[in-house]
Image: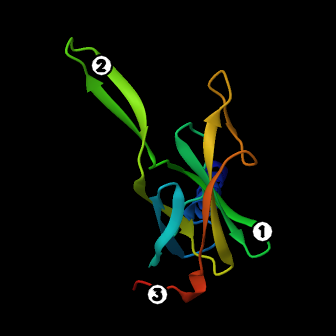
Amino acid sequence: MRKLLLFCLLALLVLGTSADCYAGSRQIAFVHVRVEKGVLVLDGVKVVEGAMKHPRRFNLVEGHLYFEVLDVSGKRLFEGTVPDPSNRRLEYADEDGTLHSKNVEVESAFLSVRIPFDTAARTVKFYRIEVQGHGKAKLEKATETFGSVTIELGEVDHEE
């Protein structure tokens, strides 16, 4: 019984620290981006105290954007997904009451991504996620880059 208790305590300690934060960072950077006629524009960066949990599973979902945070040499520091704000699904009923839906691309949209604070971060690149048959999502980085923004986290004011 004592060994079981010790094992459970050790497992809780190890799992708790690994899921507690990402890469040891105790700050989170919110990168705010505007999409204007298909072009990404950095709208601002806000750094706050906090820790990001390590993602358990990475899902590629159609209608979302994959993003990666790169350092000056192009090494990936962090990656994630976020819903694509430039494509909106509209649902409506016709005169008969039949429900219809369609995807509409909007000219102006806003998105915000949360990343672990790292002064080495220089670029956030975004890619569209496309489904490649049988509901399996595949990242087509080479074919369609949604856009990128340059960031300087070392020059950002920190929220206390």
Percent from the top left, x then y, of residue 36?
46, 59
Percent from the top left, x then y, of residue 30?
48, 69
Type of amino acid at the residue the image marks with label 3:
Asp
**How many neighbours does mark 1 have within 10 angstroms: few (below 14), some (14-19), or many (20 or more)?**
few
Label 3: which residue?
157
Look at the numbered disc 3 and give the secondary structure of its residue. Answer: loop
Say if 156 sits above or below 66 in the image: below
Label 2: which residue?
99
Percent from the top left, x then y, of residue 130?
63, 36
- In the rendered structure, the answer to whether residue 1 lies left or right of residue 92 reads right
Look at the numbered disc 1 and give the secondary structure of its residue. Answer: loop
Q: CA distance from mark 1 to mark 3?
A: 25 Å
Quarter placement of the C terminus = bottom left
Type of amino acid at the residue the image marks with label 1:
Gly
Toward the viewer: 127 or 68? 127
Type of amino acid at the residue the image marks with label 2:
Leu
Q: CA distance from mark 1 to mark 2?
A: 46 Å
- In the rendered structure, the answer to whether residue 112 lies left or right of residue 78 reads left
Percent from the top left, x then y, of residue 74?
77, 68
Residue sitting at x 40%, y 29%: 102
Which of the two marks, 2 or 3, is nearer to us in this view? 2
